[in-house]
């Protein structure tokens, strides 16, 4: 395949992941990971038919074997192609329940989907970043998608907040370990409802009350283009009318 | 057994857990949980021989069955005895390693020992708190022991910080859900080296450079005695010469 | 006058300041500072008539000359008496207004009353702490009273939040500079309505919805008694039903 | 004058302010404010001679009259021209001294230069934003430049940290009040040494150890272009090798 650099987007549905894929596909060959191919197939087709290059690989990010198989395939399909960016944008692990009704498995879901998924993806991305960083236009970039629950544990959110806090701890640890090696690690806090198919019916008093997935993607792209002198670690994104 | 209220200390070694047990034993019958009985036996004996009442139960806090067995035994041994306080003071989950050398199991250790242990202990303590709260002198109290890594993910600390962040998320979630029901949930950030047998050999330039386990215990006891009008959620404890 | 150590409480009205004065008067001679003597006279009388020792000095804490005059008087009245604790518990600087209606003077009020007042009080207290610290039972202690607005700037709170943020910056700076010299500097975040005469009429759905000034005073006393191995810098106090 | 929208940069020297001015001059007429005209004259000339439009106005941002005079002149020179962005990038208020050597005036410097300067600039910018916002391509934007000292008070930094904390409180208050009115208020934390003429001689072990003013300007421009559905309030910028 071609010699453009690569971007991997882990966690792609019809919302933010798709927007990020489209944005990064303007510069890179993009690899879309999601458990269900229905989630990435339309975006893959769209990108390929509009002059970009995209493939999708069915992957369970919380599972090491599945992630390893996916990255082995990526390396095989794109030999000698540096990895420019990996975006970890997981969908899973959301549970909202009174604490006393929460099972151990439900409580662990947040950690499994968010932190452990990020662990697997980071384990495979970081060596590729270090290996290929001198062939890239921008510092290799690893972005994690956070949420309100990354900063605040709330009633009925013990499982999800635990996972999102753990993901942020991982992001900070990686930023401090791999930043000095020239890898840009970032954590974006998405504080509000995103305007995706699943939330179409959610009506708010004000217009523009939902985050734009394309605007999120633009901010991720901006993070990616920062030089190593000037890395942002964290930024918070929210609609103008959001209470915070 | 007698009718004093109970305190459960989960995670007892010869350091902080022992000091907390001694402090709470001045007012309550205390139950000490640790995997290895060698860790609680000396304290149990000491408390019992000096007029207090203590038992130890060998427990793996990260294991639901083990925690359930322990609490079943507690309820059986102390029928009609309200639970006044549970202190979660876990020892495990500490891993310090470059990220790329960290295995999936090692990465999970922090979450398992810290967050999941806290989950199991909280699941059994909270119903007992709600049931017995009107028979107590002070609001029932659940205190979690945090660390520097609860607030900051550092290079080589991805596993431990993930676990400690997750534990703090759990603590916040429980404080916001059970505070309004009259349960006092707190999180203490221990920022520094504690003066325990294991750290005896660590010598610092200044004297008094290590946290006193007895002083930590005094602060936990102070948290416990706060009325419900005036709950502290979080406090940070560190030696006077600590850089922070 | 007698040889007990001293505590200075700056900012005394019929609420928290009075409770703190009563609490510290159990161990120390207390000096109460407030602009209006009506604010400290009843407490001074109460303490003196119940076996304690108290004096009040009319002082404008935001004014350097006034603070200097007060401390000169203190040193003269209590020669050779070490200063054990100073509590900065200011009442002023609260303004709640849409930003575009805020005058420059109103905006500065928060800084003047909170941060500059704390500056003056700290300037005079710290040398006394360093001078007398070896004669004290506990490390000399400087406690600043913060608020919700110490952590969060909100609509219409630009003036007050600026003052409270600045006060917290000062507290952190002093803790990091004077902690290693054995002075305990703390910052308490009072997050909620305090149960004082002025708020008597504020009725909430739940009982016990207001912070107890006596319980705040107990926590301040607890901070004061911590050994230098185990200093708390910050704790947050709120009623059990408070949303946060 | 022409009908391009306007950007005001308050606090321009040969470093970050100049880069921000150049960046915003690609789209807007820019107005540069600094006390000393020597600080903005070279940039004004450079922008005008390369096809942009720039003016400089000698202004003391900490002084209300001076700021009012400057904005009156701006409105007169650019009638019917909407204000698209104001960047508050103040240079003053830096004092580094042991606390006991700090005078009252020195302590106030941080607040005066940072918070009060921002107050004056915001007072004049916000009405212009609200008035002209429907004529703009992007939501009107008010960006404040913060520093490490915005988040942490350190020994010898009481004055500067108080000013920077207060500035952040103001930024948060304005974001929460004017965000829902469609104004984008942001706060950027510059955590490290910026590569400007004044720091040319500061040599670090690693190359690229200083923040790039041009990259900071790019991030500010990115913030400005975010749609109101997706506002970032805060981002932190630091060199890849910075310890944090």
Image (cartoon, coloured by chain):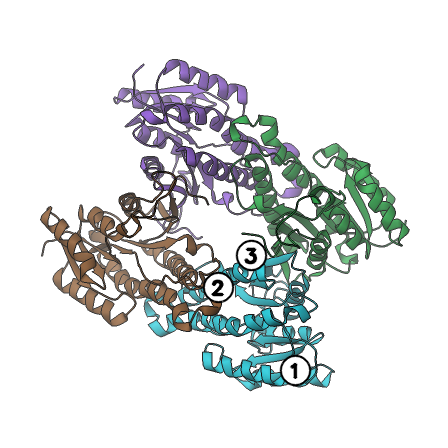
Chain colours: A brown, B cyan, C green, D purple
| Residue at 67 percent of width and 48 percent of height | C194
Query: Marks 3 and 2, how far apart in space?
Result: 27 Å
For mark 3, what is the residue? Answer: B243
Closer to the chain start, of discs 1 and 3, is 1
Which residue is more in the foreground, D108 or B143?
B143
Q: Is residue D154 above or below residue B193?
A: above
- Mark 1, secondary structure of its residue: strand
Q: Total marks drawn?
A: 3
Q: Is residue B140 above or below residue B13?
A: above
- Mark 3, secondary structure of its residue: loop
Label 2: few (<14), some or many (≥20) within 10 Å? many
Query: Marks 1 and 3, how far apart in space?
Result: 38 Å
| Residue at 20 percent of width and 65 percent of height | A71
Residue C71: x and y in percent read 79, 41
Which residue is more in the foreground, D183 or B242?
D183
Q: Which mark is residue B170?
A: 2
Q: Quadrant of the N terminus of chain A?
A: bottom left
Chain letter behind tag 1: B
Residue A89: x and y in percent read 30, 56
Q: Is residue A201 left or right of residue C144?
A: left
- Mark 2, secondary structure of its residue: helix
Residue B14: x and y in percent read 60, 78
Chain letter behind tag 3: B
């Amino acid at each position: 395949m071609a010699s453009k650099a690569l971007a991997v987007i882990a966690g792609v549905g019809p919302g933010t992941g798709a927007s990020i894929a489209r944005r990064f596909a303007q510069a890179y060959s993009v690899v879309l990971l999601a458990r269900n191919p229905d989630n990435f197939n339309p975006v893959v087709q769209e990108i390929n038919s509009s002059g970009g290059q995209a493939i999708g690989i069915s992957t369970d990010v919380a599972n090491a074997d599945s992630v390893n198989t996916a990255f082995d395939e990526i390396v095989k399909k794109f030999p000698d192609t540096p990895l420019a960016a990996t975006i970890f944008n997981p969908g899973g692990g959301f549970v909202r329940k009174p604490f006393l009704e929460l099972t151990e498995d439900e409580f662990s879901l947040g950690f499994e989907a968010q932190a452990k998924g990020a662990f697997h993806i980071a384990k495979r991305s970081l060596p590729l970043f270090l290996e290929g960083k001198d062939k890239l236009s921008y510092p290799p970039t690893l972005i994690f998608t956070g949420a309100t629950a990354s900063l605040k544990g709330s009633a009925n959110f013990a499982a999800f907040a635990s996972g999102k806090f753990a993901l942020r701890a991982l992001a900070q640890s990686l930023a401090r370990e791999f930043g000095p090696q020239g890898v840009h690690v970032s954590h974006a806090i998405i504080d509000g409802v995103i305007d995706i198919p699943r939330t179409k019916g959610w009506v708010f008093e004000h217009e523009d009350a939902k985050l734009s997935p394309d605007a999120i993607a633009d901010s991720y792209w901006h993070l990616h283009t920062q030089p190593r002198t000037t890395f942002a670690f964290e930024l918070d994104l929210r609609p103008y009318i959001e209470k915070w």
